[in-house]
Image (cartoon, helix red, strand yellow):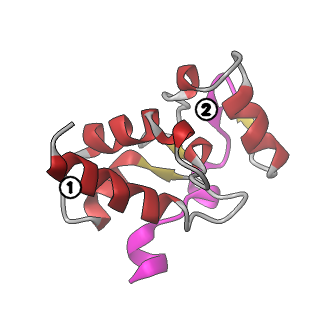
Amino acid sequence: MKAENKNFFQKVYEVARQIPEGRVTSYGAIAKYLGAARSARMVGWAMNGAGAVEGVPAHRVVNKIGLLTGKHHFEGSNLMQQLLENEGVKVVDNRVIDFERHFWDPFKELG
């Protein structure tokens, strides 16, 4: 992994650690907050490896319409959904219900 990717990944993890329980954000929202609006896919790659990083709630990061696109990176077939539902976020057909209500925007929340 290139050094700049590692630094970017660390920044992604710092933002993700601040997502409150019961809230979700998107790959694109994190990328935009970090000044790399066109790097949502890179945020996704960071989240793919977040399982090995302590304290990163990767289950709270979904795609721009609330789909659990990263669920295959969690053990078991429904772990991502179970983690969200344990926090009060309802998921149906791999999609967050009331996505707008649960959405946490790093720009608004972190300034």
State the residue position of label 2.
95
Residue 103 rendering spot, x and y as whole percentages: 56, 58
Between 111 and 97, which is closer to the camera in this rendering?
111
Residue at 20% from the left image edge and 65% from the top image edge: 35
Quadrant, the N terminus: top left
* In the depicted structure, whether residue 99 falls above or below residue 14: above
Residue 94 placement: quadrant: top right
Q: Secondary structure at mark 2?
A: strand
Dot 1 falls on a residue whose secondary structure is loop
Name the image quarter holding residue 18.
bottom right
The span shown in magenta is 92-111
Residue 46 at what x, y percent from top left? 37, 42
The amino acid beneath tag 2 is Arg
* Along the viewing direction, whichever of 77 and 100 lies nearer the viewer: 77
Say left or right for 5 vs 63: left
| Residue at mark 1 | 37
The label number, if any, that marks residue 45 in the structure image: none
Instruction: Pinpoint residue 56: horizontal percent, then vertical percent.
Output: 56, 52
